[in-house]
Amino acid sequence: MSNFKSFEELGCWKESRKLRNFVKDAIISKLPNSERYELTSQIKRYARSVGNNIAEGYGRFHFQENIQFCRIARGSLDETLDHGIIALDEGYISEENLKELRIIHNKTLLILNGYIKYLKNQKEK
């Protein structure tokens, strides 16, 4: 399908890994224990889901399946940002933390959209 030997070489997956680690280190670490089964669980799952879906899509045989998993990843990416906004609104993180999350989110989204466009072009060939 591509010149990549593994999903780990994809720029969008690499950036999703940065997002996941940022969420773990800069956001989850600041959430109170009372949010352990609510916000902490949610943001952790969605931050992980971005890379998980990119990897699963890469492993699929058809371009359309890969595109669909990338669209799911894009939804998880936006949901991760929404949980970051909730963390700010609840007073758990600072504006600076949210700003950094937005930067990583936007970069991941840009690369992921480029990958989806590439897959669509390959599908049409």
Image: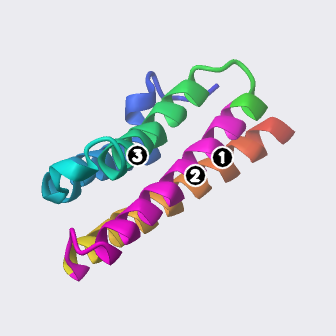
Q: Is residue 6 left or right of residue 40?
A: right
* Residue picked out by circle 2: 74
What whole-number distance in Å separates the C-alpha atoms at marks 1 and 3?
A: 19 Å
Which amino acid is tagged 3? Answer: Gln
* Residue picked out by circle 3: 42
Of callouts 3 and 2, the N-terminal one: 3
* Residue picked out by circle 1: 71
What whole-number distance in Å separates the C-alpha atoms at marks 3 and 2?
A: 16 Å
**Corner quadrant of residue 30:** bottom left
Which amino acid is tagged 2? Answer: Arg
Contact, mark 1 vs mark 3 (Cβ under 8 Å): no
Contact, mark 2 vs mark 1 (Cβ under 8 Å): yes
Residue at the image position 31 percent from the left and 66 percent from the top = 87
Which stretch appears magenta?
66-95
Give residue 92's position: percent from left, percent from top: 21, 68
Per the image, label 3 sits on a secondary structure element best described as helix
Residue at the image position 65 percent from the left and 48 percent from the top = 116
Secondary structure, magenta segment, majority class? helix
Q: Looking at the image, which is closer to me, 31 or 63?
A: 31
